């Protein structure tokens, strides 16, 4: 085909265009304006939204960077997806352009914002290791440092800073590095280092908002250190940056707060400035902050009444900010909690309001909440005492006196409600419930609680009642008209105390019915029975004891703690908290009065000699010695239990009895005693084993061992039936069993305790190595016969030899004439059957046949 001249001329142009499309300039042009520009724009918009949505707490040092909010990131998912796509396309399509490193930085930053930290780290590391652009490598290191900070990886942050310090940073990157370091130290609460790093670059920060915030932070830090002039200068710098209104407003307020006012005139001028701010329409939403700042100013000048007034005004603004309200309530709570006020009830209500308004993520929220709960407990204990004292006082009145008293109370309450209704109309509707509660408590503490909670009010009411009506005997109909004195005493004020006529009853109104209902409710709350009154007394004792601890350990009011404990002992000498209260007073007086401390120490020892406190006071090494004893008992017990596990029951029984004779006052002994009881089934009989379990359960009425012993007791009947079933009502001729030696006697002719004691002495003197024990069981339907039994004997011959020697010993004694007095050897199973058959003669015949 022949090429036409026109086509031939166009061919070089086409070649030129194809070559130009692959040129560096063309790549840069498309990468920058078709990709990077929009990706960077989207990312900038996301950062702006993070800044705009973050609510700064101007009462604390502002953060250098607004934290990343996951909600905002999620809400901008589409923008971030588009930015990520455009940055990826630049890397894929325009790989030779100068915007590849910047695109990787954008991708890493998006991954950081999305909390995809590991991917972000890999991206920044890739840039640092592969980029040939020093600026991009430095930015990657800075971004990597920020990522590790948000991950809380302090060691890795410091590792990255070592690489950054080796770089020759550009001016822009140096500023970012210092800001990043300041942010790092702010996270560690090393505020002196924050100030040090910010001072190096604060004037050169190109971003106006960030520069303004840096100046404001430096002002806050200087203010916290008491460097008023320096703080004033930095706040002034913040104002000169044409800042957002919120920072402008707070910077002005803080300037007023740090300025010196050597004269009243200068102070008046400052107040004029504040008044102008209050009147400025732009500051309507900041009214609470302005009053709050005025309160802080007065508090710093130690003018607490004026500070309180301003803080209270801050709680009454029309458009309150919840967080700011919380900060204001916190100031009021702290003022009333600390000296010179120390009005803990009032502080408690303000702490309630603080917790209700502050966000849960407030820096010291947990500590504030802990304080609030402690004071709430304090108020609760005081209210319990006041309420119960009042109710118990009213319970002492006769039915007629109480009826008259409640009539007067209900009239007074009706008047108070009417007055409160008038006051409430003057209150602004914007006041919160908790705020109203605190204000009412401060103005009139008794109005917010039931009258009977106020013991003083009830006492005064009773005195007033007695002044009008006299100290009358507890009789009915004392108000009748025929009693001239009562008739003369009646007046319009006391008309409610006269008897109600049928005509009056017929004219009753809804208000009267409501009054009757209230009266019935009040009457129902007054304790009438002994049980109800005892319950209230116990609650009072518990409250006094708890209150003493709160005064001492939480409020650190040692004298108040002493007085509370003393009041408890004075009102309730036999309180169930007596031991703990005596010890509390002993430890308190150890600090203030050694003589009194000695008195209370001796009371503990004399009144509670078996208590751990008494033993510790007598012997400071008691606990260590007891621990040593416990360790020794456990070592010996393990040997006994090993013998028991191997079926060496006689050895186990001897070892256990040695432990019980050797040791006392060891917490592990109940376990030892339980094994001793178990051994009765192996060395004595099911009868004595059953009796042993019953005795054990009575001695130890609770605990794991108790529950186990209960289970064993329930299982005895089947075991007993099994033994008796094997014997078929005949005494066993299996003489290889463990044996006992028994002594039967009439309980009315020989004293059981004396005989048992003499037998134990005899055994100790003649058979100490055998570790024999002596037990007792009642025998016969009438239980007139007692049986002492000595055990254990491994073989029949040993029991026979012991019985022979025992008979010789008895022959030498001057024993009372007793037809039921016998000695006999008996095997374990036969001992069980003996009690089942309940006939001694049958076994004695068996014994004469088979035993020497």
Image (cartoon, rainbow, N blue to C red):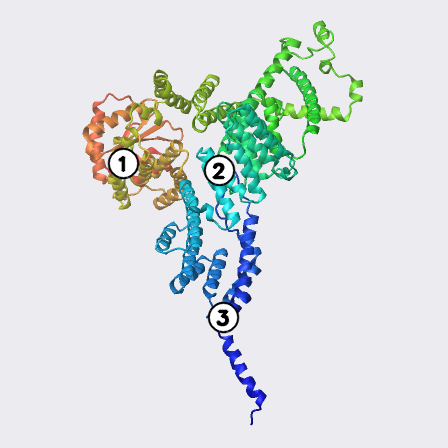
Pick whichever of labels 3 and 2 is earlier in the sequence.
3
Q: Label 2's element? A: helix
Quarter holding residue 124? bottom left
Residue located beneath label 2 in the image: 233
Residue 316: image location, x then y, percent:
63, 32
Choose between 825 and 630: the one closer to the eye: 630
| Residue 118: mark in rendering | none
Q: Label 3's element? A: helix
Q: Residues within 10 Å of mark 3 (few under 14, many from 20)?
A: some
Choose between 713 and 272: the one closer to the eye: 272
Nearer the viewer's eye, disc 3 or disc 1?
Answer: 3
Q: Residue at x 44, y 48 (%)?
A: 179
State whether residue 845 is above or below residue 132: above
Q: Residue at x 55, y 23 (%)?
A: 264
State whether residue 136 is above or below residue 350: below
Q: Label 1's element? A: helix
Choose between 278 and 204: the one closer to the eye: 204
Residues at marks 2 and 1, CA–CA distance in whole angstroms? 75 Å
Residue located beneath label 3 in the image: 25
Nearer the viewer's eye, disc 2 or disc 1?
Answer: 2
Residue 390: image location, x then y, percent:
58, 20
């Amino acid at each position: 085909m022949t090429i036409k001249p026109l086509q031939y001329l166009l061919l070089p142009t086409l070649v030129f265009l194809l070559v130009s499309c692959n040129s560096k300039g063309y790549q840069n042009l498309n990468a920058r304006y078709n990709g990077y520009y929009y990706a960077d724009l989207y990312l900038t918009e996301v950062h702006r939204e993070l800044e705009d949505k973050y609510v700064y707490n101007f009462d604390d040092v502002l953060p250098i960077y607004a934290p990343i909010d996951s909600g905002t990131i999620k809400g901008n998912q589409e923008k971030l997806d588009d930015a990520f796509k455009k940055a990826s396309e630049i890397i894929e399509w325009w790989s030779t352009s100068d915007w590849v490193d910047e695109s990787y930085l954008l991708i890493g930053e998006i991954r950081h914002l999305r909390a995809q930290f590991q991917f972000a780290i890999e991206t920044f590391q890739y840039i640092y290791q592969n980029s040939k652009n020093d600026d991009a490598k430095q930015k990657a290191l800075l971004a990597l440092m920020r990522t590790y900070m948000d991950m809380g990886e302090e060691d890795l942050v410091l590792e990255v800073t070592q690489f950054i310090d080796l770089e020759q940073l550009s001016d822009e990157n140096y500023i970012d590095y210092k800001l990043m370091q300041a942010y790092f130290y702010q996270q560690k609460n090393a505020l002196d280092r924050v100030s040090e790093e910010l001072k190096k670059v604060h004037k050169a920060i190109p971003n106006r908002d960030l520069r303004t915030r840096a100046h404001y932070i430096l002002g806050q830090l200087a203010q916290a250190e008491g460097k008023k002039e320096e703080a004033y200068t930095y706040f002034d710098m913040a104002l000169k940056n044409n800042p957002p209104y919120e920072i402008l407003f707070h910077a002005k307020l803080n300037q007023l707060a740090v300025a010196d006012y050597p004269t009243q005139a200068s102070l008046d001028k400052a107040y004029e400035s504040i008044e102008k701010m209050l009147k400025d329409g732009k500051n309507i939403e900041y009214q609470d902050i302005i009053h709050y700042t005025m309160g802080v100013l007065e508090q710093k000048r130690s003018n607490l009444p004026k500070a309180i007034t301003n803080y209270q005004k801050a709680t009454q603004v029309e458009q309150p900010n919840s967080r700011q309200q919380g900060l204001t309530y916190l100031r009021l709570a702290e003022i009333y909690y600390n000296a010179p006020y120390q009005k803990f009830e009032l502080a408690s209500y303000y702490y309630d309001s603080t917790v209700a308004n502050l966000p849960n993520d407030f820096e010291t929220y947990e500590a504030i909440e802990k304080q609030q709960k402690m004071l709430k407990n304090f108020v609760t204990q005081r209210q319990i005492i006041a309420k119960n004292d009042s109710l118990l006082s009213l319970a002492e009145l006769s039915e007629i006196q109480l009826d008259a008293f409640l009539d007067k109370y209900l009239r007074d309450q009706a008047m108070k409600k009417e007055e409160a209704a008038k006051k409430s109309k003057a209150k602004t509707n914007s006041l919160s419930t908790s705020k109203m509660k605190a204000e009412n408590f401060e103005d009139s503490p008794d109005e917010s609680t039931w009258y009977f909670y106020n013991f003083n009010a009830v006492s005064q009411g009773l005195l007033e009642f007695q002044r009008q009506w006299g100290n009358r005997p507890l009789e009915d109909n004392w108000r009748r008209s025929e009693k001239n004195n009562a008739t003369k005493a009646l007046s319009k004020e006391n008309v409610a105390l006269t008897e109600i006529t049928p005509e009056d009853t017929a004219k009753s109104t809804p208000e009267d019915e409501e009054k009757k209902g209230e009266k019935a409710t009040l009457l129902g709350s007054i304790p009438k029975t002994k049980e109800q009154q005892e319950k209230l007394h116990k609650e009072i004792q518990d409250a006094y004891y708890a209150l003493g601890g709160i005064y001492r350990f939480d409020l650190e009011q040692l004298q108040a703690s002493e007085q509370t404990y003393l009041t408890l002992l004075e009102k309730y000498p036999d309180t169930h908290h007596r031991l703990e209260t005596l010890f509390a007073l002993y430890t308190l007086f150890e600090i203030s009065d050694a003589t009194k401390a000695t008195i209370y120490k001796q009371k503990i020892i004399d009144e509670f000699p078996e208590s751990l406190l008494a033993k510790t006071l007598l012997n400071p090494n008691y606990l260590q010695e007891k621990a040593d004893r416990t360790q020794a008992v456990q070592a010996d017990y393990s040997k006994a239990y090993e013998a028991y596990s191997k079926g060496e029951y006689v050895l186990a029984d001897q070892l256990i009895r040695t432990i019980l004779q050797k040791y006392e006052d060891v917490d592990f002994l109940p376990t030892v005693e339980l094994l001793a009881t178990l051994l009765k089934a192996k060395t004595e009989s099911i009868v004595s084993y059953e009796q042993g379990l019953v005795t054990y359960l009575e001695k130890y009425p609770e605990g794991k061992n108790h529950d186990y012993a209960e289970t064993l007791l329930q299982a005895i009947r089947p075991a007993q039936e099994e033994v008796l079933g094997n014997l078929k009502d005949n005494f066993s001729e299996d003489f290889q069993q463990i044996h006992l030696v028994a002594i039967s006697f009439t309980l009315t002719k020989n004293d059981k305790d004396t005989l048992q004691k003499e037998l134990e002495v005899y055994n100790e003197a003649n058979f100490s190595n055998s570790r024999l024990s002596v037990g007792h069981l009642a025998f016969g339907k009438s239980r007139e016969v007692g049986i002492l039994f000595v055990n254990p004997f491994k073989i029949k011959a040993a029991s026979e030899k012991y019985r022979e020697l025992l008979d010789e010993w008895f022959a030498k004694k001057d024993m009372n004439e007793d037809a039921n007095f016998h000695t006999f050897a008996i095997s374990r199973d036969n001992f069980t059957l003996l009690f089942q058959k309940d006939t001694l003669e049958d076994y004695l015949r068996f014994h004469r046949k088979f035993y020497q």
